[in-house]
Image (spheres, grey):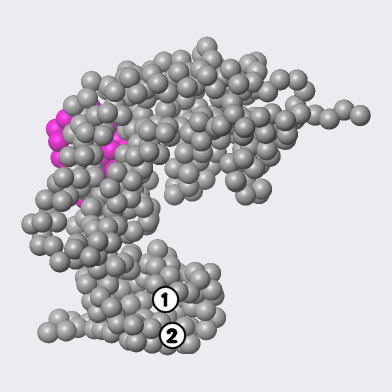
Amino acid sequence: MESKMQFKIENENNDLQALLERVQEQQKRTADILPQTKDLQFRTVESSVSDNKQSQIVIEGLRGEPTRIAKVNDVCFNQIASKAKIEVRTAKYLKDEYSFEFDKLINAIWQKQNSRQMIRMFDMTDQQECFDYVARAFLSNKFKTFDNVHLLESTLPKLIESDANWQIMNWDLTDSKLYARFKSQTQTGEGANVGDVMANGIIISNSEVGQGSVRVGQITWTLACKNGMQSRNETRSSHITSAREDSDQWSILTDEAKDADNKALSLKLRDIVESFASRESFDEILDQMKQASSDIIEGEYSISKVSESLGEVLKIPQKETSLILDGLLQTLQQDGYRNEPLSRATLMNGVTAVSHKVKPDLVDDWQKLGGSVLNMSASNWNKIKTASQLEFA
């Protein structure tokens, strides 16, 4: 990842360099173990940083190894609860209010249902903490590791070599996933209306902790507001290969065989990036945008009713429809949509605008919902048009 050519896709904020440094630092700290649950102890202690109590896993030292303590983060805790068939909200309540009983229950399950698990951890022994590791995932021993460093090594060279002049737009690295989004500086064109300038884009994402697959997808960026819409190309390819392969064979493979399997995945990712980086695939989306702009809500309508009916069609919780309304009002003030009829393209852009206001792990969801609006069925579009009309006595 230390390519001398990486500056070609860097932005003025040095976001790519920051991403590479974070990923490399985490990779250095990565420590995976495959213990039997009978050799583990779950315990709850008072947290030094919050009112909530903190969960820990004590990993018994075997064959001369020292006993280690791992702080359990939220992702790992939720997986421990799910593995024990305890609803997550209930587990968190029991942890905080009935810690002693909850610890006994988890430990009893681990002893009685003894199984080999993969615990993915970060080594914190140089941080002078009261624990040695952060336990970030509690997974099947069949979990197939394809880490963030592998994703970047597979995709960045192809982006750097491309004549589409890619530049990183933004990235997020949460406890659950890595997301990195890129924009072409040369593959641009008008979308729904005159003045609605758009650019081709690529998103890559991965979860090292069993919260999603290795993904490469296509984004269309609206340059006026930097909204990103993930097209069908992304949704059809959202599970290029699973980062969690529950095949009985995986856990018995040698490191050489696992490396070969990851190499094959890297080659697939490289080729898919090249496909999504093509001008042809971008032009197809621009044509869809123009078609969406011809689907207009005519007559007298209520913009709040539009957002409510759109939320119903997209199956969005009612409390979040206000976010759609805000996105629509914002869209109606930007180039390409100002003083234009309210169209399906307007709704698409209004939905993707919500991605600027949500947590990092929800950005993808709203960008995909924008793609759902772009590919909406005629029957659903008619529902929205009908429900949005004002009624006069």
* Residue 381 within the magenta-colored segment of the rendering: no
Instruction: Report x, y in % for residue 320.
Output: 62, 46
**Image point (43%, 70%), residue name:** 82
**Image point (63%, 16%), residue name:** 340
Instruction: Report x, y in % for residue 302.
Output: 75, 30
Residue 75 is at least partly visible in this image: yes
Residue reaching furthest front?
Answer: 379
* Residue 11 within the magenta-colored segment of the rendering: yes
Instruction: Report x, y in % for residue 242.
Output: 29, 51
Image quadrant containing the C terminus: top right
Residue reaching furthest left?
Answer: 256
Position of residue 141 relative to residue 367, above or below, is below
Position of residue 163 relative to residue 231, above or below, is above
Residue identified by numbered label 1: 84
Q: Is residue 336 left or right of residue 234?
A: right
Examine the image and state in which quarter residue 83 appears: bottom left
Q: Is residue 160 left or right of residue 64?
A: right
**Residues in magenta?**
1-25
The dominant secondary structure in magenta is helix
Q: Is residue 244 left or right of residue 158?
A: right
**Image point (45%, 18%), residue name:** 287
Query: Who comes first in sequence, dot 1 or dot 2?
Result: 1
Neighbour tally class for label 1: few under 14, some 14-19, many 20 plus, Cα within 10 Å: some
Are discs 1 and 2 less than 8 Å apart at CB?
yes
Of the numbered discs in the image, which one, if any, rests on residue 295? none
Instruction: Report x, y in % for residue 118.
Output: 26, 69
